[in-house]
Amino acid sequence: MDESLRRARIGVTLAFVVNGFTAGTFVARIPDIKSALGISDGTLGLSLLFISIGVFLALGPAGRNSARYGSAPITFFGTIGIAISLPLVGLLPSLQFTWFAFFLFGFMLATQDVAMNAHAVVIEQGAGRRLMSTFHAMFSVGTFIGGIIGGVLSQFEVSLLSQAAIFAALYLVLAFVIKSLLLPASIDQHPITKEKKAKSPIIFWVFGIFGLFAALSEGAAGDWGGVLARDTFDATPFVSTLPFIFFTLAMVIGRFSGDYLAHRFGASKVIASGGSIAGIGLALGLLVGGIPMLMLAWFLLGIGLSVVIPLMFSAAGTLASTKYQGVIAPSQAIARVSGVSYFGFVIGPPLIGFLAELVELRWALFLLVILTVALIPAARYAKAA
């Protein structure tokens, strides 16, 4: 790997860490947000929906802009956007303002996400080897560290606004560091035409479905694990973050192993095995109950889900630049897979919140057991990659 690729790999790694750290510190404070606003599980689910809507609506523009202007500048502006949106999230003056802040926050997270994944594909192709799971592992490292720090700040009752202001300042500095390390914008600029945009190879929708199952489960694990621990099992603020911390630790382990496992056994077997581990582990934890079993369940869920989305993104980018070259740009292919996958983040929070109002949160989360087990028969289609 030449020097420019090494520098770009460091820059993309930093972007993944920032994205993950942001998610981790936010998720750790969700119970505090619920408490500060004085809302029910159902209203919390509705509120989290605005983040998901922001994510979903950002995917198309992020993919097109990354193709038109290059993924590097969009990664930079996405990082700046996260820094700008964070203090708004921390204000919490009213429920309606929080919805607006959540929407902007989700939009900026997704903008950076699509662009940094597109840049990661360029680095993978330049290096001639699998790297995507490792990049996503660094996202999970950021999420893991962010979850711990967010839990500690919650335990010591540091205000959400103070937390947001500190991290926003840090991200502004890191944005310029990342910009200086990435490859030139011209490396992955692609002309956008109506003819190319109209074509939609079915394989990208198939990849998106796999990602949808994983994204809904992954998002719900983060959004609702702390609420379940605190409200159902009377955990303290820090202890209520432990299921999510164990989940992200498992994601780190699984994703650092993902590139090797996919190369050794094939993507379909890795996905099917992950579905089995996630489904059985989560079902066992929810049935037995208690904080220790909850931590084990979330750990096994993280192991099972860890490589699904990275494998889908890597496959989409590779196919777009090889089999479908001239039909769809890699950044657009990733955005398309993201669009289907991240719809899980859109429907997940309100769906789990609605079910929790009907049957209690603990039993509502059995929906995730069904979705993770569904990855087992669906995984055979990954052989197409």
Image (spheres, rainbow, N blue to C red):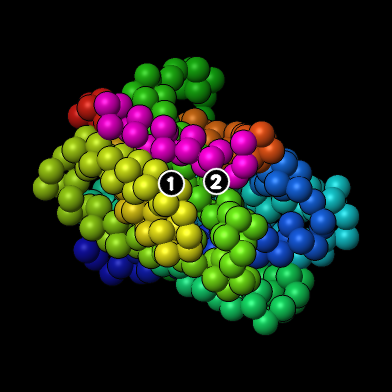
Confirm or deny contact between disc 2 and disc 1 (CB under 8 A).
no
The kind of secondary structure element at disc 1 is: helix
Identity of the residue furthest to the bottom in this view: 156
Tell which tag, 2 or 1, sits nearer the viewer: 1
- Left or right: residue 244 compared with residue 163: left
Number of on-image labels: 2
Visible in this render: residue 360?
A: yes
Measured along the vertical axis of the image, is residue 123 above or below residue 180?
Answer: above
Q: Decide which of 334, 74 is in the foreground and name it.
A: 334
Measured along the vertical axis of the image, is residue 87 above or below residue 119?
Answer: below
> Which amino acid does the dot numbered 2 rest on?
Arg
- Label 2, label 1: how far apart the Cα atoms are: 9 Å
Image-quadrant location for residue 83: bottom right
The residue under the point 48% across, 63% down is 291
> Which amino acid does the dot numbered 1 rest on?
Leu
The residue under the point 22% across, 27% down is 380
Q: Residue 287 carries which label?
A: 1
Query: Label 1: few (<14), some or many (≥20) within 10 Å?
Result: few
- Left or right: residue 314 compared with residue 342: left
Measured along the vertical axis of the image, is residue 90 above or below residue 276?
Answer: below
Position of the C terminus, as image quadrant, is top left
Identity of the residue furthest to the left in this view: 264
- Counting from the top left corner in percent of width and height, residue 157 is at 72, 78
Q: Give the range drawn in magenta.
A: 359-378
The residue under the point 50% across, 17% down is 198
- Counting from the top left corner in percent of width and height, residue 22 is at 58, 63
Query: Label 2: few (<14), some or many (≥20) within 10 Å?
Result: some
- Counting from the top left corner in percent of width and height, residue 116 is at 46, 53
The residue under the point 76% across, 48% down is 40
**Residue placed under numbered mark 2 in the picture:** 362
The kind of secondary structure element at disc 2 is: helix
Q: Which is more N-terminal, label 1 or label 2?
A: 1
